[in-house]
Image (tube, coloured by chain):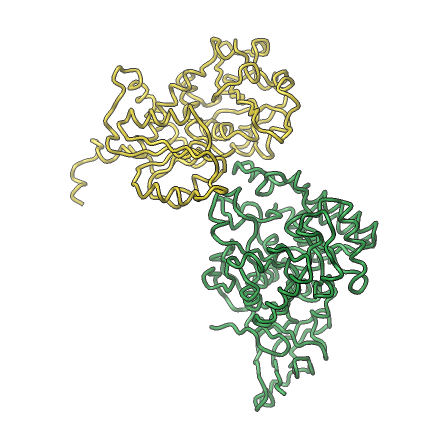
Amino acid sequence: MRLKRKDILGIDELDPDELMLIIDTARNFKEVNEREIKKVPTLRGRTVINLFYEPSTRTRTSFEIAAKRMSADAINISVSQSSVSKGETLKDTAKNLEAMRPDCIVVRHPVAGTPHMLSRHLDCSVINAGDGMREHPSQALLDLMTIVEHKGDVRGLKIAIVGDIAHSRVARSNIYALTKLGALVTLSGPPTMIPPGIERLGPAGSVTVEYDMNKAIKDADVIMMLRLQLERQGAPLFPTPREYSTLYGLTTERLAKSTREDLLILHPGPINRGVEISPEVADGPFSLIIDQVTNGVAVRMALFYLLLGASREDKDEPRTEEKE
Amino acid sequence: MNRLAIAGGRVFDPEAGIDGTFDIIAMGGRVASIRPSTGDMEAFKGDGWTLIDATGKLVLPGLIDIHTHLREPGFEYKETIATGALAASAGGFTAILCMANTEPVNDSASVTRYILDKAANACGVRVLPIGAVSVGLKGKKLSEMADMVKAGCVAFSDDGLPVLDGALMRRALEYSKLFGDGGLSVISHAEDPSIACCGSMNEGYVSTRLGLQGIPNAAEDSLVARDITLSELTGGRLHIAHVSTRGAMELIRAARGRGVRVTAEVTPHHLALDDTAVEGFNTDAKMSPPLRSKEDIEALIEGLTDGTIDAIATDHAPHSPIEKDIEFSSAANGIIGLETALPLTLKLVSDGVLSLETAVRSLTSGPAAVMGLNMGSIRIGTDADITIVDTEREWTVDPAKLLSKSKNTPFAGWKLKGRATETIIGGEVIYRLKD
C-alpha cells in the first residue's frame, strides 16, 4: 500500500482513510524500535535530506533516526537564517539539493506555504516538518497515534488544546486530524492567542473556543498543552509568564477539576516546566509526553515507507501486471 | 497639418454629457470638432487625414491612472519609464502619475526633471511625477515641495509608506495649499505599521487557515481616520490611496458629507479579488493593502457608485521573480495593473455591478478632478487624448505578451472581454492593438 500522493504537506489535504493508514503502519513499525537491532532494509539506497531553516533537536533527530532505521541515507542541513537576506534563495538551495537526487526532502521553515512552494519546484517527495504557523503534520500524526493507542476510536472524544493557538502549527494540524476522525476539540487560551475563524477549521460544531481553562478541561478526555513561546518578543500577547501560568498552566490543582479518571495529557515539547505545565504533571501518571516522542519515530518511519518504500517490492501485486 | 478623424464610434463622455455616435476630428493635436456621425467616412480618407473607423467601438476620453510605480531611477530591472509608458498605452492610458519611491527618491527638482526627461523620450504617454512628502521618504522633514512643483510634480506622497508622524502630515497638508488651484493633493498610504505588524495578508479566517499573520482592517481605518481629522483641521487636500476596507469607506463618506476635502481611489484588483486569492500561497496575490473580504468589496463598489470613491487607479507595482518567487511572507508587495485595469473594470460593468458611466468616470474625469488636471473629457480646444475600446474583444491574459517588463499578475490565464484598440495622445495614435 502506498499513499496516493508525492508529498506530506499538511493534514488539511489528507482524508480519514489516509490518516488511519499512516497510524496503522506506524504501529507496525513501533516494534522495530524496541528490538536490539533497530533496522529494516526497506529503504536501503534511498536518500533523505533534512532541510531545517528553524532550530530543532527533537523533530530533526526523530526524522533522521526514522530514515536510518529504514536503512536510508539521511543528511542534515541546518540553515541558520532565512535565505532572503543572505545570498542563495530557498528555491536555488532546493534545486541544488535536488541535483544530488534525494528521494525525499524534509523541510522545516518559519514561513507558511514554503513546503508547497518547494513541492512545485521539486520532483522528489517533500515532507513538511513545520511551516511557520500553518501545519506540523507528523506531530499531529504522532499525537493521534498516542491517543488511538490508549482510547481506540477517536470519534466522540473530547480534546482540549490549551495555549498559544494563534501561533501554533501543532494546534492547527491537530484540529484537522482529530475533527476529521470525529473528535470534538475545545481550544483554550487568552483572547490574544485565539485567531479569528479558528472554529471553522473543523466541521460545524466540532471546534469551540473557551477562554476559561477550567471549563475547557473539565470534561476533556485528552488535554494537549502547547508550549508558551517565550522567545516571541515584541508581541505583547500576555503580561508575564507568571500571570500566564496562573490562568493557563496545567498544575495538579487544576487537574483536580477534571472529571476523568483515564485522562491523557499530551505536549509536543519542549516543555517549559512551571509555565504551561508543572513538573508534577509533566512527570505524573497521566502524562504521555515521553510516549509521544517514541511514537514520533514510528510515525516518521511510516511516512517514509508510505511515500518511498511500499509499491516497488509489494508482494501483494500480481506478477501478471509487470508485462504491461 | 495632419488631421485625425475618429468616426462612427459610440462616444461616451459622462463629464461632457455625451453618449452617442459621433465623429471626432482633431487638428494640430487638439479636438477640433465633435459632430453626429453620418455614416459617411469618405471625407476622412484623403491626404493629410488619419482615419480610425470606430464603428462598434467605444470612444472614451483618454484614461488616466493616478497611481503607478515606474521604478526608474533605481529599479530599472523591474520596469523603466519607457516600458511602463508602453504598458500604459497598451492599457488605454493617455496619462499616468508615478510615485516617488524610486532610488534616489523623487524628493527634489532634479529627480523630478530626470523622470520628465525620460518620459519625454518614451512613447508619448503623459507621465506626471508625484513628489515625496518627506525627504528620502523617511517621514521626518518636508521635501522642497515648491521646487518640485516648479519642476513638474502634480501631487505629493510617501507611498508605499504612511507618513507616521502626525505633525509632519499636518504640516504637509497645510503647506500643500500653496500650490495648484487651491492646493495640491497629499496622497496617503494609510496603514498603521504597528497594527499591521508582520502581517502578509488580510486578517481573517483565510489567514488563520493558511497560518499567516494577518493585517486587520483596523490598520487602515485608524490611519484614514487620523488623516481625515488632519485634513479637516488644515483644509488641505487629502487623497486616500488604494482604499480597501468598509470602515475606511464609511469614514470617507461621512467626512465628505461634512465638507472635508478628502478624495479616494480603489484598485481594480481590490474589486476583482478577495483574500481567498492567496490560497496556494500565490505571491501574485500579495500586495499592500492586502486583498480583503467580500463584505469589503461590496462597500467599495457602493463607494464607487455613490461617488465616495472618485477614481480607479492601478497601483501598478512591477516586481521581478527575485522578489516574488520566494517565501510568502518575504515576497514583495504589489502587482502590475496597467494592462488589465480597463478590461477588469469593463468586466464589472458587464457583470452588472457597476454602470458604464461610473466605470468611465472613475478612469477619466474622476482622477483628473482629484489631481486638478485639465484632462479626462473630450472638449473642443483641449488635447486630443482619446482611448478607443473594443468592448466585445475577448482575450486571455498571457503575462509573456504583456508590455510591462515585469509579469507579476494574479490575472494570468483570465479570460477577459474588452480592450483598448487605439490609444491617441495629442492627436497621434501612440498605440494600436495588433491582431
Q: B164 left or right of B178?
A: left
Name the residue: 27% across, 32% down: A309
Q: Position of residue B315 (x, y in %)?
A: 61, 56
The C terminus of chain A: image quadrant = top left
Q: Is residue B80 above or below residue A214?
A: below
Residue B201 appears in which quarter of the rendering? top right
Q: Nearer the viewer, residue B26 or A180?
A: B26
Name the residue: 71% across, 62% down: B148
Q: Position of residue B97 (x, y in %)?
A: 65, 62
Name the residue: 56% across, 57% down: B74
* Residue B186 appears in the picture as rendered: yes
Residue B48 appears in which quarter of the rendering? bottom right
Tally of numbered tags: 0
Residue B220 appears in which quarter of the rendering? top right
* Residue B355 appears in the picture as rendered: no
Q: Which chain is yellow?
A: A
Q: B141 left or right of A72?
A: right
Q: Position of residue B330 (x, y in %)?
A: 52, 43
Q: A289 left or right of A196?
A: left
Q: Which chain is green?
A: B
The N terminus of chain A: image quadrant = top left
Q: Nearer the viewer, residue A78 or B289?
A: A78
Q: Is residue A40 above or below residue B306?
A: above
Q: Position of residue B259 (x, y in %)?
A: 83, 55
Q: Nearer the viewer, residue B426 or B345?
A: B426
